[in-house]
Amino acid sequence: MRSNHGLAATLIVLSLTVAGCAEVQRAGEDIARQSGNPRLAGAIHGVGNVVGSLFPIGYEEESSIGQAMALQVVARYGGVVDQPELVRYVNLVGRAVANTSDRPDIPYRVAILEHESINAFAAPAGYIFVTRGLLKQIRNEAELAAVLGHEIAHVSQKHILDVIQRSKRLAGVSEAGLSYATSNPAAFKSVIDGAVKKLLDEGLDQDKETEADTVGEVFATRVGYDAEAYVGLLTRLRDLKGDDRALFKTHPNFSARIEAVQKTIQGKHLAATGVVLQERFARMTKRI
Amino acid sequence: MTPPRLLRVLLIALWIGLFVWGTEAWAETVYVQAKTAQLRAGKTSLDAVVGNVKFGDALEVVGRDGSWIEVKTTSGAKGWIFANKTSSSKPSGTNDTLAKLGQSMRGSDASATTASAGARGLDKASEGYANRAGVSARDRDAVDRMTAYQIPDQEVEEFLREGGLGEYAK
């Protein structure tokens, strides 16, 4: 009888692997336990964990990861700018671009980091950051839209989540889902710290940055902003910073980025609409 | 029913079937590629709004003119939509079906990780992280306010209108 139960449980776990069904997994665990085989029940549970960890991270989990990463970004970059009108303006531009992005169905929020370096970041679940230093380099709304489009593309293409899912560190967390965040906060912290290090220090893979440039350019032009605006900003930044990889280890060099964006403009026939909204940008950012 | 009459009925049924199938097969479909979009009575942003559609809705294409597409919704309502708010392929967006299945298989309790989704306040996971990482009260408050920050869709629409963006392009 016991062997029959064991066989039934084994068959169930096999069907679980094929069908990926959580209910079947739990039924298999129950039968194995009832048949007095806790080791088999544990094995079935383990298979469920492993199979489960292969599934994508859902929005609720993404939101927890994004919020925790946002805490670290804000802490390392000296806090956020507290100028309500300016914050509202960058959020309006961000929302305008995000609303017709490939992932408009999640909330996006933009914060300005109190930092003079020239940079921008995106954490999962729509947490977007631009530094005060970068805003000072931007000359019009179309350039800002392109920068935010780049960051929104990182979120819509789930670049950081891909990194996290691939990392061995997350393996420990995936096995038990994000309930680890409360039951094993050290493991959760390790995952977040690893992701923040990748985002702020090491940089994403170059192909992900190039994808964010090209996809973000499409997002910004969908709203009607001039397609050439981003090329203008990248060119000025190259003139300012050069193509020194030591300075820009987190992104491909500017010449390569400009070339990729220009190819996208030509390949997708993105329009130079002439809509850059320089005056509105100047009016809204005069106190930056 | 005599055989010739039966044959005639079958042929008519086949013809009707082919006609219906052909109409369906040739009808072009686009999908709403925007959080929300408005259907208008005409092909300008000045025309009256006759309906609202949302991200992922399927629309049958009736006609095209420049930056606008005349469409019919599944409920039969007709109107014009700004072409940049549509996509020829069904957008995936945030499809959590697979993620929820995986979460279920891992036996994780998502509700334990999120105090109250959408409400003001850091979730439990982030709060625990902030404690362990020594994040200051000022920075916690900044992320808390950032999370809660919302701008109504109407204000975004007004922003686009003022800037002559999207369907309000001059």
Image: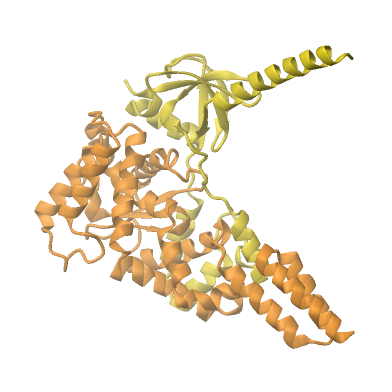
Chain colours: A orange, B yellow
Location of the N terminus of chain A by quadrant is bottom right
Left or right: B98 with respect to B6? left
Looking at the rendering, which quadrant does residue A166 occupy?
Answer: bottom left
Q: Residue at x 26, y 64 (%)?
A: A250
Total of numbered circles in the picture? 0
Instruction: Indicate the position of residue A182 as horizontal and vertical percent values.
Output: 59, 74
Instruction: Indicate the position of residue B81 as horizontal and vertical percent values.
Output: 48, 24
Q: Residue at x 32, y 31 (%)?
A: A224
Q: Residue at x 55, y 69 (%)?
A: B125
Q: In the figure, B98 relative to A16: above or below?
A: above
Q: Nearer the viewer, residue B94 or B139?
A: B94
Left or right: B150 with respect to B7? left
Residue A140 in sight:
no
Q: Nearer the viewer, residue A230 or A218?
A: A218
Left or right: A98 with respect to A200? right
Instruction: Indicate the position of residue A190 as horizontal and vertical percent values.
Output: 46, 78
Looking at the rendering, which quadrant does residue A279 occupy?
Answer: top left
Instruction: Indicate the position of residue A84 as horizontal and vertical percent values.
Output: 38, 46
